[in-house]
Image (cartoon, rainbow, N blue to C red):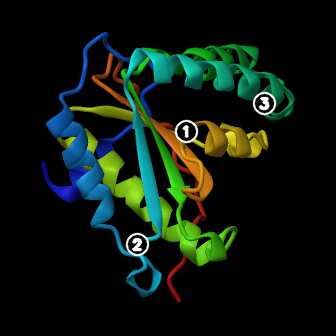
Amino acid sequence: MECKEAIYERRSIRHYQDKQIPDEVLVDILEAGTMAPSGMNLQHWHFVMLRSPEKLKECYKLMGEVADRFRPILENRFARNPHIIQETEIFLNELGGAPVCMLAFLSRKEYNGAMPAISGVAAAIQNMLLYAHEIGIGSCWITAPVVSELQRKFEERFAPDKGQFIAMVTFGYPDEAPSAPPRREGKYELM
């Protein structure tokens, strides 16, 4: 698969097959993330892959709180599309049955909230998403815990002293093939 093909074909997956991802594949995905650029090459990220039933259950519990807090945001954004609200709430509570949930942290406390440092973590996440797609693993990048202001609970529960929680990503073998949403016009210009 060519890079452009991965970029254009990758979609957020919200329904996964009941099939485990081998550890060596998870390590490859993580390694792809660590190859991302970062400001001054600080490599200021820490990733935690939740894959045991016990840890996933703990994550689901926290995501139930996220879904409750996130509902007003969904209702405001999708007032005319109640089916999207319902689908999103189900996904937030069940994470689509994903066998793996990766948590991404900004590991340098002196950079908490600093956009350049957060950008490096985001670049690492994007590397993982594209590589996972290339090898047939679906993913969905989730920021609802941060928007819902519950990131501290994820930090305390899964990675105390590892830094600021930035995002989560579900990984698994896709059980759907969504089409691309339309792209909006006027989002770039050449000068």
Q: Quadrant of residue 112?
A: bottom right
Tell me the kind of residue under disc 1.
Answer: Phe
Q: Which residue is drawn at 68% across and 18% down?
A: 89
The residue indicated by pointer 3 is 70
Per the image, label 2 sits on a secondary structure element best described as: loop
Q: Quadrant of residue 35?
A: bottom left
Q: Point out which mark residue 158 bears.
A: 1
- Camera-near label (1 vs 2) is 1
What amino acid type is highlighted by mark number 2? Gln
Q: Tell me if residue 39 can be seen.
A: yes
Q: Position of residue 147 (x, y in %)?
A: 75, 44
Q: Is residue 9 above or below residue 83?
A: below
- Which residue is labeled 2 in the image? 43
CA separation in Å, label 1 and label 3: 21 Å
Find out whether the residues at labels 2 and 3 contact each other: C-beta distance under 8 Å. Answer: no
Q: Nearer the viewer, residue 89 or 6?
A: 89
Local secondary structure at mark 3 = helix
Q: Position of residue 32 (x, y in %)?
A: 25, 56
Q: Distance between the residues labelled 2 and 3?
A: 31 Å
